[in-house]
Image (cartoon, rainbow, N blue to C red):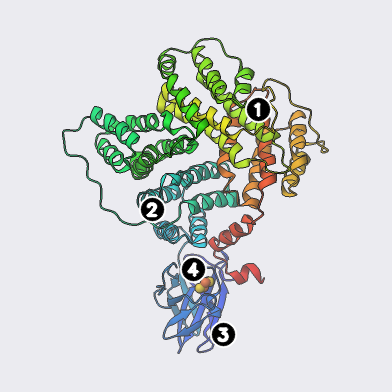
C-alpha cells in the first residue's frame, strides 16, 4: 500500500517493472494504479478499466496503446483517451523518475468528474446500456451529486425519447422515473442506487431529432388555445394539441392552466377505461412541481397531447353504458363541483360496496350520491385507496391474483390526490367515475366485500419483538410465502410494532431481491398513503397488501449483486480486487 497525499509520491523502483511489462500498486485510498514500462518509458494510469473495472495490467500494450483483456477497449497510455464508444477516458498520472525510483503525481480525491459522469449517464440512456447507467449513477452518488441532478438528465432524455419515439403508453416510463426517484429518497447506498438505476433504465431508449415546433403566429389568446385543445382532443389531433400547448408556454401565466386543461381533456367520458390517462397526468404534474416547467416542458407537452388526443376504439356494451351514464350525470357533476363541501361525512362502507359490485350503473350512482351529498373529496379519495389496498390484502393467490389490475386500482386511486391539486373539483369529480369504472371493470368477484370500517382479523406472528418480527416477515417475502405473510404483517401491527420501519425494510427486500421495477410505483404510493391514512381502521391493509404482492411476484434477479458491483467500481476497485482477493 502506497501512502497517498496530493503531490508526487514514490510508488515503485524502476527495476520492479521489466521492459514491456507492467505492475499494479495500490494507493492508500484503495485505488489501484497501473505502471507500464514501454521501451524504458514509464506510464502510470488508473488500473481499473473504465468500462467494467478489469485490471489493465492484464491487458496488452502496443504502440503506446493499452487494450483491456476483457472486452477489448483501448486507451492512449499518455493522455488516457478511449478509442471506442461507450467508455469513459482513462485517468492518467504524471510520472517522474528519481534515482531509479518511480514517482507519480496524485491529486486530492476531490470529485471533479461530475459533468463527464452526467454525460456518461446520458450515453447509457441513449444506448439502453444497463451497466453504463448503473456505473454512471454509482460514480455520481460517490461524488455526492444529488439525485435531483441525476433525475434531470433522465427527464430531459425521456422528454426527447417520448417526443420522437413514444406513444401514450410512455406514461409507464414517466411513472417508473418519478416513483423510482420517490423511493430512492427513502434510502441510502445500495438501495438508493437500485431505485435510481431502475428509474433511469426505464427511461432509456433511442431519442431522435425532429424539427422544433414553432408557436402559433399571433393573435393567440388563452381562450383560443383552450377551445382548440378541447376540439383537437375530441378529434384525436395530437399535433394540434401539442402546438397549442407549446404556444401557451410562451406566456408564464398559462403554466397552471396547461395542466388543468390537460386534466379536463383526459377525464372526459370518452376516456373511460383508460386509467393511465389519470396516473400519467399525475406523474407529469409531479414532474413539473419537482423539476419546474423549463425541464419538464418537452415531456409534458408531448406526452400530455398524446394522452389527450389518443385513439379510442368503438366502446363495448358495458363501456357504452358507463359512458352514457356519465354523460347523463354531467349537470350533477357541474353543480357538485361548484358547491362547497358539506360538513358531514358519508357512508364509506355503502360507497365501497357499490364500487365492487357487478353493476356499473349502481357504482356510478354511488359516486353521484356522494357528490350530491357534498361529501368532502379527501375522505372519498381515502376510501378509494383503502378499498384497493384491502383487495390486495385479500385477493386469493391460488390461480390468478390479479396484481396488475389491483395495483392499477391502488395507483389510480392515489393519483386522485394530484388530480384534485392540479385539476380542481370538477376534474376530480369526473376522475371518481373513471376510478369507479376501473373497480367495476376488474370485477374481481372472488374477493368478497369487506366493510372498511370493520376490524381486521387478528394476525399471527411467531416473533415476540420488533426486530425478529421484521426478519420473520421479510423472510416470508423472500421465501415467496404469500399465504403466511399477510397474517404475519397483521400480527406485527397488532403487537403495536412500528409500521413505518416495517415498510422501509420490506422496501429493501423488494428493491434488492426482485428488481422491483414493476412494484416501485405501488411501493411509492404506499409510502405516501401510509403516512396520510393514520387512524383509519383499514390502514394496515396497505402493508398487508404490499407484503403479499411482493411475495407473489418476486423474481429474484439479484439486483443487489448488480448494485454492489457498480458501487465497488465507483470506489475504484478492479474486478480482481473484488472477485479474486
Ligand atoms: S473492456 Fe475493460 S472491462 Fe470491459
Q: Quadrant of residue 484?
A: top right
Q: Is residue 169 above or below residue 93?
A: above
Please name the residue that numbered disc 3 is placed on: 16
Vertical placement of 27 versus 176: above or below? below
Q: Earlier in the sequence, mark 2 or mark 4?
A: 4
Looking at this view, name the residue that lies furthest to the front: 317
What distance separates the C-alpha of mark 2 from that of mark 4?
30 Å
Q: What is the quadrant of the C terminus in the image?
A: bottom right
**Residue 194's spot in the image, x, y percent?**
57, 52
Q: Is residue 31 left or right of residue 541?
A: left
Return the residue at label 4: 50
Residue on which the image places disc 2 = 165
The relative height of residue 217 versus residue 423 in the rendered view (above or below) is below
In what element is the residue under mark 1? loop
Within-10-Å neighbours for mark 2: few <14, some 14–19, many 20+: some
Determine whether label 3 and label 2 are within 8 Å by CB.
no
Q: Residue furthest top?
A: 343
- Where is residue 62? Give x, y as percent: 45, 86
3D distance between C-alphas at marks 1 and 2: 41 Å
Q: What residue sits right under mark 1 in the picture?
A: 539
Q: Which SS class for mark 2? A: loop
Q: Which badge, 1 or 2, comes first in the chain's sequence?
A: 2
Q: Identify the secondary structure beneath mark 3.
A: helix
Q: From the viewer's perspective, is the residue at label 1 or at label 4 nearer?
A: 1
Q: What whole-number distance in Å separates the C-alpha atoms at marks 1 and 4? A: 48 Å
Amino acid at each position: 500500500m502506497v501512502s497517498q497525499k496530493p503531490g508526487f509520491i514514490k510508488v515503485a523502483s524502476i527495476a520492479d517493472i521489466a521492459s514491456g511489462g507492467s505492475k499494479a500498486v495500490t494507493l492508500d485510498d484503495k485505488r489501484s494504479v497501473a505502471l507500464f514500462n514501454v521501451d524504458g518509458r514509464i506510464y502510470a494510469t488508473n488500473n481499473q478499466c473504465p468500462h467494467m473495472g478489469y485490471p489493465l495490467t492484464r491487458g496488452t500494450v502496443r504502440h503506446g496503446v493499452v487494450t483491456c483483456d476483457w472486452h477489448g477497449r483501448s486507451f492512449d497510455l499518455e493522455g488516457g483517451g478511449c478509442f471506442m464508444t461507450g467508455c469513459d477516458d482513462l485517468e492518467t498520472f504524471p510520472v517522474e523518475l528519481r534515482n531509479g525510483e518511480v514517482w507519480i503525481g496524485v491529486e486530492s480525491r476531490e470529485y471533479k468528474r461530475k459533468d463527464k459522469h452526467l454525460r456518461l449517464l446520458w450515453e447509457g440512456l441513449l444506448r439502453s446500456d444497463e451497466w453504463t447507467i448503473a456505473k454512471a449513477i454509482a460514480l455520481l452518488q460517490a461524488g455526492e451529486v444529488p439525485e435531483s441532478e441525476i433525475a434531470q438528465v433522465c427527464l430531459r432524455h425521456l422528454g426527447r425519447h417520448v417526443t420522437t419515439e413514444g406513444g401514450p403508453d410512455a406514461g409507464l416510463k414517466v411513472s417508473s422515473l418519478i416513483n423510482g426517484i420517490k423511493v430512492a429518497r427513502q434510502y441510502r447506498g445500495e438501495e438508493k442506487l437500485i431505485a435510481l438505476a431502475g428509474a433511469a433504465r426505464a427511461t432509456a431508449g433511442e431519442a431522435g431529432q425532429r424539427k422544433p415546433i414553432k408557436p402559433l403566429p399571433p393573435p393567440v389568446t388563452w381562450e383560443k388555445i383552450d377551445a382548440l385543445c378541447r376540439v383537437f382532443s375530441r378529434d384525436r389531433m395530437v399535433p394540434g394539441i401539442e402546438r397549442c400547448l407549446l404556444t401557451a408556454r410562451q406566456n408564464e401565466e398559462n403554466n397552471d392552466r396547461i395542466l388543468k386543461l390537460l386534466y379536463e381533456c383526459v377525464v372526459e367520458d370518452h376516456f373511460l377505461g383508460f386509467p393511465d390517462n389519470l396516473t400519467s397526468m399525475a406523474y407529469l404534474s409531479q414532474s413539473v412541481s419537482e423539476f419546474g416547467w423549463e425541464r419538464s416542458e418537452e415531456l409534458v407537452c408531448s406526452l400530455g397531447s398524446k394522452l389527450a388526443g389518443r385513439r379510442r376504439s368503438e366502446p363495448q356494451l358495458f363501456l357504452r353504458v358507463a359512458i352514457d351514464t356519465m354523460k347523463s350525470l354531467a349537470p350533477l357533476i357541474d353543480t357538485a363541483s361548484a358547491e362547497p363541501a358539506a360538513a358531514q361525512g358519508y357512508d364509506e362502507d355503502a360507497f365501497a360496496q357499490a364500487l365492487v359490485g357487478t353493476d356499473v350503473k349502481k357504482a356510478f350512482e354511488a359516486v353521484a350520491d356522494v357528490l350530491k351529498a357534498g361529501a368532502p373529496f379527501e375522505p372519498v379519495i381515502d376510501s378509494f385507496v383503502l378499498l384497493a389496498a384491502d383487495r390486495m390484502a385479500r385477493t386469493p393467490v391460488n390461480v390468478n391474483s390479479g396484481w396488475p389490475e389491483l395495483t392499477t386500482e391502488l395507483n389510480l386511486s392515489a393519483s386522485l390526490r394530484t388530480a384534485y391539486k392540479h385539476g380542481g373539483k370538477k376534474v376530480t369529480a369526473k376522475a371518481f367515475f373513471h376510478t369507479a369504472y376501473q373497480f367495476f371493470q376488474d370485477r374481481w368477484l372472488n374477493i368478497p366485500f369487506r366493510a372498511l370500517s370493520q376490524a381486521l382479523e387478528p394476525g399471527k406472528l411467531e416473533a415476540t419483538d420488533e426486530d425478529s418480527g421484521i426478519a420473520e416477515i421479510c423472510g416470508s417475502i423472500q421465501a415467496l410465502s404469500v399465504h403466511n405473510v399477510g397474517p404475519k404483517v397483521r400480527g406485527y401491527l397488532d403487537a403495536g410494532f412500528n409500521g413505518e420501519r416495517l415498510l422501509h425494510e420490506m422496501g429493501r427486500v423488494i428493491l434488492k431481491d426482485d428488481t422491483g421495477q414493476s412494484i416501485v410505483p405501488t411501493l411509492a404510493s404506499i409510502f405516501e398513503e401510509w403516512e396520510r391514512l393514520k387512524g383509519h381502521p383499514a390502514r394496515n391493509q396497505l402493508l398487508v397488501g404490499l407484503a403479499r404482492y411482493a411475495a407473489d411476484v418476486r423474481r429474484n434477479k439479484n439486483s443487489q449483486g448488480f448494485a454492489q458491483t457498480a458501487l465497488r467500481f465507483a470506489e475504484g476497485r478492479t474486478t480482481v480486487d473484488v472477485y479474486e482477493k
